Image (cartoon, rainbow, N blue to C red):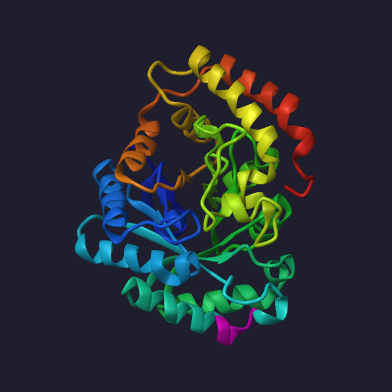
């Protein structure tokens, strides 16, 4: 497994990590046995970076990750969690007392005194711009509650604002074949400021796996069912904000391009992950996995050779023709 530097922690983390939203409840039910098997398969494949959040399954994901890390104390894992989505998304709810309470809950769930990396979880823009936000995070580092901090964002503007702060260790942002805007300014800024970039939603909620058709259905508890209109949280988190029917047609063309121009034997999902890893400035990509097979397949993408210039050009053209008109300017 290729590793890349996370400068603020003076560590190297796997180029492919694992996202654990799926181990909560917003992608349908996952048993404790399946969660453990998924994390074990990722570790066995060389993954040492795990991303979770306090709201995934109301702490269920954090507890799974914490128990797994406790069972593998010598595995060299780096665990990132997120905080801030347990309240209505109003700037006034982001208080120093709330930061401490959220942090205490995550430390308990993960079973540690000091968290490796804590990210604000897609907060309002006013929170990212406020000086006291960063002062409070610095206080938490000084108190030994966290080793480093960053922010997960919805927009490129938020990412650029966060990277103005010298202490911002990481920015987590949606980046995939169907969401290309971070290539323009965010990734160059990350390189200039030594900010780690954590690429999330890399498969556009599974669209880029090539497995979906227009008549594919999802369980009632799956956000790909209940959040298509953005009624539960930012619509950009579900299919990268692309209408499902548009995304399916584009994904079918993506699959055809992968077969024609992609590495021999690579699945569309692996090509989608390799596309992200080819982008200068990306530190790690965090595909989710619901089972061991998916975790192993995701990790294997790091071993692929960089994609050809011909395929990169074809994917840029696909985006321009099929997707660009459906992507909101703010993304």
Q: Residue at x 38, y 19 (%)?
A: 265
Picture quarter with the N terminus: top left
- Asked whether, in this view, residue 185 is left or right of residue 47, the answer is right
Above or below, 129 against 295 in this view is below
Q: In the displayed image of the protein, which residue is found farthest to the bottom?
A: 97
Q: Residue at x 28, y 43 (%)?
A: 46
Camera-side residue of 228 and 268: 228
Camera-side residue of 112 and 253: 253
Queried whether the magenta region covers residue 249, the answer comes back as: no
Q: Residue at x 73, y 53 (%)?
A: 157
Image coordinates for residue 278, horizontal then vertical, percent: 51, 31
Image coordinates for residue 32, horizontal then vertical, percent: 30, 61
- Asked whether, in this view, residue 44 is left or right of residue 294, the answer is left
Q: Is residue 172 visible?
A: no
Count of all numbered marks drawn on residues in the image? 0
Q: Residue at x 43, y 79 (%)?
A: 105
Image coordinates for residue 223, horizontal then vertical, percent: 57, 54
Above or below, 24 against 91 in this view is above
Image coordinates for residue 123, horizontal then vertical, percent: 65, 67
Q: Main secondary structure of the magenta part?
A: helix
Query: In terms of image quadrants, where is residue 314?
Result: top right
- Asked whether, in this view, residue 125 is left or right of residue 239, the answer is right
Camera-side residue of 54 and 232: 232
Stretch in magenta: 94-98
- Asked whether, in this view, residue 120 is left or right of residue 80, the answer is right
Q: Is residue 70 visible?
A: yes
């Amino acid at each position: 497994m290729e590793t890349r530097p996370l400068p603020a922690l003076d560590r190297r983390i796997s180029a492919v990590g694992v996202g654990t939203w799926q181990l909560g409840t917003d992608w349908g039910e996952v048993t404790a046995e399946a969660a453990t098997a998924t994390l074990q398969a990722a570790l066995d494949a060389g993954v040492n970076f795990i991303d979770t959040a306090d709201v995934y399954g109301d702490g269920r994901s954090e507890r799974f990750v914490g128990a797994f890390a406790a069972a593998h104390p010598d595995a060299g894992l780096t665990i990132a969690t997120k905080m801030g989505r347990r309240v209505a998304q109003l700037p006034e709810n982001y208080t120093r007392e709330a930061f401490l309470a959220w942090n205490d809950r995550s430390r308990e769930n993960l079973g540690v005194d000091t968290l490796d990396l804590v990210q604000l979880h897609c907060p309002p823009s006013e929170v990212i711009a406020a000086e006291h936000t960063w002062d409070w995070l610095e206080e938490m580092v000084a108190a030994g509650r966290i080793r480093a901090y960053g922010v997960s964002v919805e927009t490129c503007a938020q990412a650029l604002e966060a990277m103005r702060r010298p202490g911002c260790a990481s920015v987590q942002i949606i980046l995939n074949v169907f969401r290309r805007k971070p290539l323009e300014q965010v990734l160059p800024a990350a390189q200039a400021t030594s900010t780690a970039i954590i690429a999330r939603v890399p498969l556009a909620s599974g669209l880029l796996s090539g497995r979906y058709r227009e008549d594919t259905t999802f369980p009632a508890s799956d956000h790909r069912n209940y959040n298509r209109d953005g009624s539960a949280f930012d619509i950009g988190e579900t299919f990268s904000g692309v209408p499902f029917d548009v995304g399916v047609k584009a994904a079918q063309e993506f699959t055809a391009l992968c077969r024609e121009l992609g590495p021999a034997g690579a699945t569309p999902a692996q090509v989608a992950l390799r596309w992200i890893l080819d982008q200068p400035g990306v530190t790690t990509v965090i595909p989710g996995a619901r089972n061991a097979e998916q975790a192993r397949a995701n990790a294997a993408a790091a071993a692929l050779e960089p994609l050809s210039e011909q395929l990169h050009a074809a994917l840029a053209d696909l985006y321009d023709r099929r997707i660009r008109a459906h992507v909101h300017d703010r993304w």
